[in-house]
Image: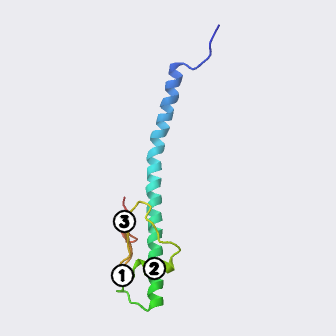
Amino acid sequence: MKKSGFTLVEIMIVVAIIGLLAAIAIPNFVKARQSSQQKSCMNNLRQIDGAKDQWAIDEGKTSSDTPGKADLEPYLKSWPICPAAGEYTINAVGTEASCSIHGTLLSPLTL
């Protein structure tokens, strides 16, 4: 009576192929996640800067005035949250908002 099944060599080849695919996929996943966080943070900074500009126009403020978070909330649906758990700094109207992790819109973004 002959039993059918996989040999040890066949199983080892399948495990090696799965390991190779995982070694290729995991770094790409991490890079895609970081890129997504950076883009989301940049978008949040743009929203904060847009809200600052609207606040300054509505309130007749100059570029040296700094709004508070409560001043900007009416101009945003909800306060943006940094996807990498950083903190946003509003800064003055004439200065771009910044993130404690990703910097500003003009600076090179790094994680």
Quick check: marks 1 and 2 in contact, CB under 8 Å? no
Disc number at residue 72? Answer: 2
Q: Looking at the image, which residue sits at the far front?
A: 70
Distance of mark 3 from mark 2, alpha carbons? Answer: 26 Å
Residue tagged by mark 1?
Answer: 92
The residue lying toward the viewer, choosing from 63 and 84, is 84
The residue lying toward the viewer, choosing from 86 and 9, is 86
Residue drawn at (36%, 65%), measured in percent from left and top? 108
The type of residue carrying mark 3 is: Pro
- Residue 83 quadrant: bottom left
Crowd tier of the residue under label 1, counting other residues whose Cα lies within 10 Å: few below 14, some 14–19, many 20 or above: some
Residue drawn at (52%, 24%), measured in percent from left and top? 11
Q: x and y percent of residue 38 in the render?
A: 43, 62
Residue drawn at (50%, 32%), measured in percent from left and top? 17
Residue tagged by mark 3?
Answer: 108
Work out whether mark 1 precedes mark 2 in sequence or the reverse, and give the earlier one.
2
In front: mark 1 or mark 3? Answer: 1
Screen quadrant of the N terminus: top right
On screen, residue 43 above or below 3 = below
Report whether 68 appears left or right of 11. left
